[in-house]
Image (cartoon, grey):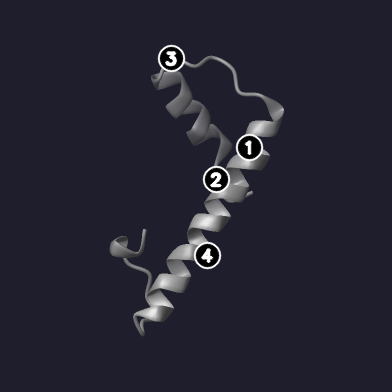
Amino acid sequence: MIAVRTQIKEIAKEEGIDNISADFFDRFDIKVKELAKACCKRAKENGRKTLMGKDV
């Protein structure tokens, strides 16, 4: 699990969401991994070994 559940729950509460289903975190984790891989690909394509904000 990449994302921290407690932080996601805090964000949900701030947005007025009280409950999170069990499958949410699995799907969310997949999306975060996909984003991280895409960022790594962009950095490599630009000849860098450092991830930067502009890679997001």
Give the spatial CA distance, label 1 vs label 2.
8 Å
Q: Please tell me whether mark 4 sits on a helix, a strand or a loop.
A: helix
**Residue reaching furthest to the left:** 54
Give the spatial CA distance, label 3 vs label 1.
18 Å
Q: Residues within 10 Å of mark 1 (few under 14, many from 20)?
A: some
Q: Pick whichever of labels 2 and 4 is earlier in the sequence.
A: 2
Q: Of the residues tagged 1 and 2, which is closer to the observer?
A: 1
User: CB under 8 Å between callouts 3 and 1?
Assistant: no
Q: Dividing the image into 4 quarters, which one contains the C terminus?
A: bottom left
Q: Please tell me whether mark 3 sits on a helix, a strand or a loop.
A: loop
User: CB under 8 Å between callouts 1 and 2?
Assistant: yes
Q: Residues within 10 Å of mark 4 (few under 14, many from 20)?
A: few
Q: Which residue is mark 1?
A: 25
Q: Position of residue 51 (x, y in %)?
A: 38, 69
User: CB under 8 Å between callouts 1 and 4?
Assistant: no
Residue at 40% across, 20% down? 15
Q: Which mark is residue 37?
A: 4
Q: Which residue is mark 2?
A: 3
Q: Position of residue 44 (x, y in %)?
A: 42, 79
Query: Does residue 35 appear to the left or right of 55 in the view shown?
Result: right
Give the spatial CA distance, label 4 vs label 3.
31 Å
**Amino acid residing under circle 4:** Lys
Residue at 49% across, 60% down? 36
Q: Which residue is mark 3?
A: 16
Q: Residues within 10 Å of mark 3 (few under 14, many from 20)?
A: few
